[in-house]
Amino acid sequence: MSAFGSRYSAFDRFQQRHRWLGFPLAVLQKYADDQGGYHAATITYYGFFAIFPLLLVLTTVLGFVLQSHPHLEQRIIDSALGQFPVIGPQLSHGSLHGSTLALVLGLAAALWAGMGVFLASQNAMNHLWGVPFKRRPDPLHARGRALLLLALLGSGALAATILAALTTVGARFGLSWKIGSLALSTALNIGLFWLGFRLLTAREVSWRHLRGGAIAAGVLYELLQTLGGYYVGHTLKHASNLYGTFGLVIGLLSWIYLAAHITLLAAEANVVATRRLWPRSFSLMIEQPATRADERALTQRGKVEERRQDETVNIDFPASPRRRKSSTRPSDRPPR
């Protein structure tokens, strides 16, 4: 074996013995096995299309509300909302008018795209937890659950976003206002992620097993919200219309994509911790002997493809001399 191969194997043994390194590497490896990046991209696609129908609805509602309140219109123009496509230019030119037809069409389009977000999220969560296709809800029940989640989690996410925005709007009230708004928003995010993780998967999972991932996702999402609000409110505030629009669209896509990654990685951490899918062999460049966690993770991944009630997928790992030797390695004992 070459010097590089020896050092690589030594690193593999080291990460398997130490949880602080082996656990996150196992999460990332299973995330790659489950094609988490593709699931995040699908969620981003539907999420991006859901934004603009919601902007159409918001434009219509503002058109009704601001007809006799010019001072409110001016305050919105001066806020970050005035930088958004569709709304910002209409506010600046005073051409914002309410339309019942636009409101109905916007709501219908928002419901369709929002349902797509939750259908994609259900599919991703079921993949992460290894739920076979034959045990997932049928298309009708899946869409009904998506609409319920859209109403429940969507309203909660809107409330959390408003609380996060109050840290900027209410800055004049002092530091205690900002800290209180951030704390409430973070707590609400954690609760929403905890509930979402429980409802988005078809498999019965206890609330306790979802707690750690919900806390991590809630905190990271709050940080992402804060950075996104700063980007819109400060970086694009003095940009030209062309640059500002392109910058906002690219920033919005990146923000949704990062939010999807945060959510799925946190859920994946719950799966790895609950199913004891670590330590994994670090076979990124050189394949190492499979651990028990490798066998459990890959078996779960293969059984996802069971699509009929009379179908059974069997995963086999031949017991080679190398495998029998590795089964007695310290990597299969509980890590520190």
Image: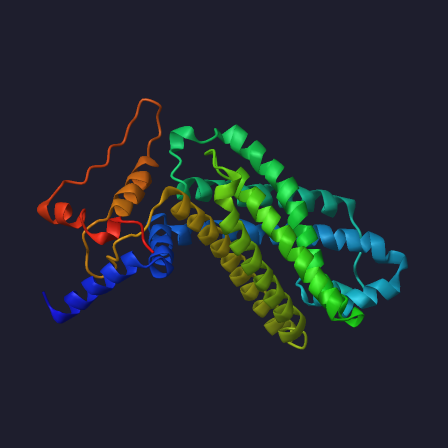
Query: Is 213 located above or below residue 319 in the figure?
Result: below
Measuring from the top left, give residue 49's x and y in whole percent: 57, 51
Can the viewer see residue 82? Answer: no
In this view, which residue lies farthest toward the top? 310
Q: Nearer the viewer, residue 244 or 158?
A: 158
Quadrant into which the C terminus falls: bottom left
Residue drawn at point x = 57 percent, y = 69 percent: 247
- Colouring chosen for the image of the structure: rainbow
Q: Is residue 57 left or right of residue 73?
A: left
- Name the foreground residue: 32 vs 46: 32
Residue visible at 25% across and 53% down in the picture: 331
Where, by quadrant of the figure, is residue 163 drawn? bottom right
Judging depth in this view, the residue of 97 and 169 nearest the camera is 169
The quadrant in which the N terminus is found is bottom left
Residue 121, x across and y down, in percent:
50, 44
Along the line of sight, the residue nearer the viewer: 136 or 213: 213
Q: Report the number of numbered marks.
A: 0
Q: Can residue 242 be seen in this view?
A: yes
Indicate whether 4 appears above or below 202.
below
Q: Which residue is drawn at 29% across and 46% down?
A: 293
Q: Which residue is depicted at the point 57% across and 55% down?
A: 218
- Asked whether, in this view, residue 282 is left or right of residue 26, the answer is left
Q: Percent position (x, y) of residue 34?
A: 36, 47
Give percent across and percent down for residue 186: 63, 56
